[in-house]
Amino acid sequence: MLTFIANRLVRSVIVLLLVSMVTFLFMKLVPGSPFSSDAGGRPRSPEVQAKLEAQFGLDRPWVEQYIDYMGDLLLRFDLGPSMRQKDWSVNQLMFGRDFWADPWRAPVMISAEVGLFSFVLAVLLGIPLGVISAVYRNKLPDHIAMFFSTLGVSIPNFVLGLMLILVLALSLGWLPVYGWGETWKQAIMPVITLGTGGMAFIARLTRASLLEVLGQDYIRTARSKGLSEQVVLNRHALRNSLIPVVTILGPLLAAWLTGSFLVEHVFAIPGIGKFFVTAVFDRDYSVIMAAILFYSLVLVLANLAVDVAYGYLDPRIRFD
Amino acid sequence: MTTNTQQFGDATLTAEQAQLEEILKRKPTSLWKDAWRRLLRNKVAVVAGLYIILITLAAVFAPIITPYGRDEPDFANVRAAPSVEHPFGTDPLGRDVFTRVIYGGRVSLGVAFVGSLTSMLIGVVYGAVSGYLGSWIDDLMMRFVDLMYGFPTLLFIILMMLVIPPNSSPGLIMVGLFVSLGVVSWLGTARLVRGQFLTLREQDFVVAARALGARPRRIISRYLLPNSLGPVIVALTLSIPNLILTESTLSFIGLGVKSPVPSWGGMLSDGWRGMRAAPHLAIFPSLAITITMIAFNFFGDGLRDALDPTMRGRE
C-alpha cells in the first residue's frame, strides 16, 4: 500500500512541476507585455516599458525568473504582484487583503464553498437517483431519471445558469440575480448550476455500475439464500458498485473547477474564478499564472486522493 | 438440397433444416451493413443524425439561406424581439440574430469537426505505434499518456489561446483553436486504439498474416486499423459535444473568435449582459449550443449501440 501511495505521490509532483514549467513558458511567450499600455489604456513609450520591465525583473533570463518565481512561491508563499491591479499583490487578490481577520470573505474560501456545496448536491442527489434507476430498471422512474440526467450532462453549465437567472430571478423574481454571502438564497442558483452536470453524470454511472453488480453471481447467491432485496442491496451490491463512482470523482472535480469560473462569472460571485476571468481579459499574467497553478494543485490533489481511495477500496489495483 | 427433408417426412428434422436453409439463403452481411441497419432502427439517433446533417448544411450554405447579411446593421431596429421579419430578433447593432446564429454554426461546428479530426489523427497514430510495437516502447508511451491525464486541459487550452495576439485575424484564431483542441484531446483515442491493437495483434488471422510474411504496413492497414475503427468513430462523435462546449467557453471568456465574426459562445457572452431587456439575445445561442450538443450525444450513443458486436444477431 505504501509503495502505491508513494508512486502516486511522485507522479503528482512531476505533473505539478510540468504544469508550472509549461505555464511559465507560455506566460513568457505571450505577445505584448503587461506594461505596453498604462492604466488609462494609452500606449507607453518603449523606454518607459523597458524600465518598468527591469523593475519587475522581467528582463532577466527566463530560467532565472522561473527559479526565482518558484522559490518565492514555495519558500515564502508569495505569488508576486498583480500586473494590472496596481495596488494588489496576487496573494491579496486570492486570499483577501487580510486573510486572518475575515477568512470567509477570501476569494479562495468563497470558491471552495461554492464547490463544496455543489459537490454535496451532486453526490447526495446523484447516487440515490442512480440507485433508484437501477432498481426500477426500465420502468417509469428509470426513464424519467435517465432522461433528466442525459439532459443534465448535455446542457453546458453556463447555459443552465443563464436560463435559471432568466426564469427564477428576472421573470419570477424569486431569487436574487447575483452575489454571494449575503443571503442563503444567493446560493441556490449557482450551486444548482454547478452541481447538475456532476449529479447527472454520477447518476448515470451509479446506475450502470449497480446494474453490472446486480448481475453478478454473488448477488444471485445472496438472493438464493433468502435474503430480502433490501439487505442484498445494502450489504452486498451498493458497496461494490460505488467503487467506479469514486474513480470518476477526480475528473469530475476537474470539470467542477473549470466550470466554476464560468459560474462565478455569470453569478458575479467574488471567488477565484472571477479574478481568473478578469485576468484573462486583461492579460494580467501573474494572476493568470497563480490561478492556473492553484487549479492544477487542487486537481492533482483530488486525483491523488481518489487514486489512493480507489487503491484502498479495490485491492486488485494495489498489486498492479 | 431442399428435397431430402420432404422425402423423409420427419417433422422436427424438417423444421430445423428449413431454418438452416433460411439462414443460408440470407445474403452475406458485413459489420458495417449490420450496424447501419441497427442504427436506422434507433429513432432517437436517426432524429439526432438528421439534425446534425441539417445544421451542417445550413452552416455550409449559410450565405444562400440567410435572409440578411451577416454584419448588416439596421439601426432603426435595435434589440428587437423576435418577429416575422426577424425570427430570432435583432442584436444591439440591429443585425439579424437568426443569420448570425447560422454563421456562428460555421465557427462552432468547424472547430468541433476539425479539432476532433486532428485529435483523432494524433491519437490513432500514437496508439497504433504504441500498440503495434509493444514491450518497452508501449510502456513508455503509455506512461506519458497517463501523466498527461493529470493535466488540466481547459487551462492548457486557455494558455495556448493566450499566446495568440488579441487582434489577429479570425483565421489565425481558428487555427489556434484547432491546434490547441487537437493537442489536448488525443489521449482517450490513443488509449483506445492501443488497446484494440494489442488485442487484435494476438488474434489468429493476424498471426497467420504475419506467418505468411505480410509486411507490417499491410498488417496495420488491412487488418488492425479497419477493425479498430468502430470504437474510434464512436469516440470521435462523442468528443464533439465537448469540443463545442470548449469553444463556446473560450468565446464566452473572450478567447475565441472576436466580433464581427459570430460564434455561439461569443453571442452568448454579448447577450447575457443585456439579458434583462432582451432575453432573446441569450436564449437563441444557448439553444443552438445545447441542442447541437444533445444531438451529437444521442447520435454517438446510437452509433455505439449499433457498432457493438455483442448485439449482433439480436434483430
Image (cartoon, rainbow, N blue to C red):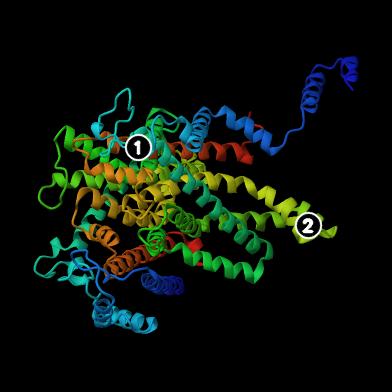
* Image spot of residue A169 (x, y percent): 17, 38
* Image spot of residue A105 (x, y percent): 13, 61
Residue at (53% x, 68% y) in the render: B144
* Image spot of residue B31 (x, y percent): 68, 38
Q: Within 10 Å of the Cα at label 2, are there few (<14), some (14-19), or many (20+) other Cα atoms?
A: some
Residue at (47% x, 40% y) in the render: B297
Q: Is residue B126 visible?
A: yes
* Labels 2 and 1 within one chain: yes
Residue at (68% x, 62% y) in the render: B132
> In which chain is the residue bearing label 2?
B
Q: Would you name the residue on which mark 1 appears?
A: B72
Indicate left or right for B186 with B69 as reference. right
Q: In front: A251, or A211?
A: A251
Task: Name the N-terminal-most of marks 2 and 1.
Answer: 1
Picture quarter containing residue B42?
Answer: top right
Q: Amino acid at mark 2?
A: Val
Quadrant placement of the N terminus of chain B? top right
Q: Would you name the residue on which mark 2 appears?
A: B207
Q: In front: B78, or A263?
A: B78
Q: Amino acid at mark 1?
A: Glu
* Above or below A239: residue A204: above
* Above or below A35: residue B158: above
Q: Within 10 Å of the Cα at label 1, are there few (<14), some (14-19), or many (20+) other Cα atoms?
A: few
Indicate left or right for A118 with A131 as reference. left
Q: In front: A302, or A23?
A: A23
